[in-house]
Amino acid sequence: MRKWRVGSLSMGVLLISLGIVLLAALIKETAIITQILNWWPIVLIILGLEIVLYLFMAKEEQPKIKYDIFSIFLIVVIALFSIGVYTVSSIGIIPKITAVIASQEYAVVVPESRTNIPESVSKIFIELPKASVSFKKGEPDSVIVFASGEITAETKERAEDFTNQIEVLTNQVGDSMFIQITDIPSARDLNLGANSLSYTIFIPEEKQVEINRQNNYYYYNTMIDCDAITNTWLVENQGMVKLNVKENNNITIKAMVNNQHSLSGNVEWDITTESEGSKAIGNVSFGSGSNRINIINQGDVEVVYFE
């Protein structure tokens, strides 16, 4: 006579159910994790029913329950695993993992944002985003900003949704225009978002410009075409600052960096330091040197001269 071991039936039903769920998820292209999380408690119900059914069908007055230890062990392991996955899912990690698995990189181009600069404005303050930024010579009465790069997202539409979060905020106070470019999430850890986004900003002529980048953003570069510098600029930065100088540019560059090794390029810097290991100040001029840019930087400053 065969002996019924409690747990064997439950294990068989569990394997059949799991196979059905896997097949259905494959055919319908749905997320299997969601189905398992919704239906895993039925395993405990089947195991309980199996015990009750065994006791009801047993012919002995005091039946002794015999368990299939290995099957029950697997059921417990699966149940504990499901509870763990359910707990993790309840705090929002599973959807993030699912989104990351389904994501890919999409090339995007953010449409230009144009800010009118009245004639009364003589100074422009710009707060930089968490991205590399290039400055170029622009139109007389506008600051133009656009961006391009790659965004990690589940779909092309979702990538475009990220770009729609980019805003250029402006506020005029007296003769000063304050411009801030809002950040979008970066694709790090389990978060989707910008992977390698870079901005280009066109600056009008004859304006003083102050550029600020704070909050330990050492990973992003600030690149400046010196054609754009037609007055006095101040750059407070953390990260690489690269200046491209052409033969017809009239500019004086003064940079304060952590040490003299942070000054580079194909020019001869006039470097001064107060003491060993102190901050270094580098100076270099081109043409008449009538336009000036002062740089206070925690990273490197590179000047490249094009004849």
Image (spheres, grey):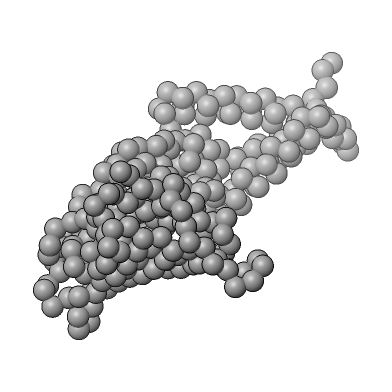
| Residue that appears at 43% across and 51% down | 267
The residue most toward the top is: 1
Asked if 274 appears above or below 86 in the picture, the reply is below
User: Which corner quadrant holds the C terminus?
Assistant: top left
Identify whether 291 is placed above or below 165. below
* Of the pair 144 and 222, the residue shown nearer to us: 222
Foreground residue, 212 or 285?
285
Res 300 visible: no
Q: Quadrant of residue 262?
A: bottom right
- Residue under the point 32% across and 38% down: 107
**Furthest-bottom residue in this view:** 174
Q: Relative to residue 214, is residue 98 depicted above or below?
A: above
Residue, x 69% and y 31% (percent of image)? 10
Which residue does the image show at 49% across and 46% down from the upper left?
95
Left or right of 294? Residue 145 is left
Residue 255: percent from the left, percent from the top? 45, 64
Which picture quadrant has residue 17?
top right
In the image, 228 versus 21, the foreground residue is 228
Q: Position of residue 228 (x, y in %)?
A: 24, 58
In-image side of 170 versus 270 (left or right): left
Classify the position of the N terminus by image quarter. top right
Q: Position of residue 274 (x, y in %)?
A: 60, 73
Left or right: 133 as drawn, with respect to 249: right
Q: How many marks?
A: 0
Q: Whole-percent x and y of residue 53? A: 71, 34
The residue at the far front in this view is 288
Q: Tell whether 264 sits left or right of 169.
A: right
Name the foreground residue: 114 vs 183.
114
Residue 73 shows in the view:
yes
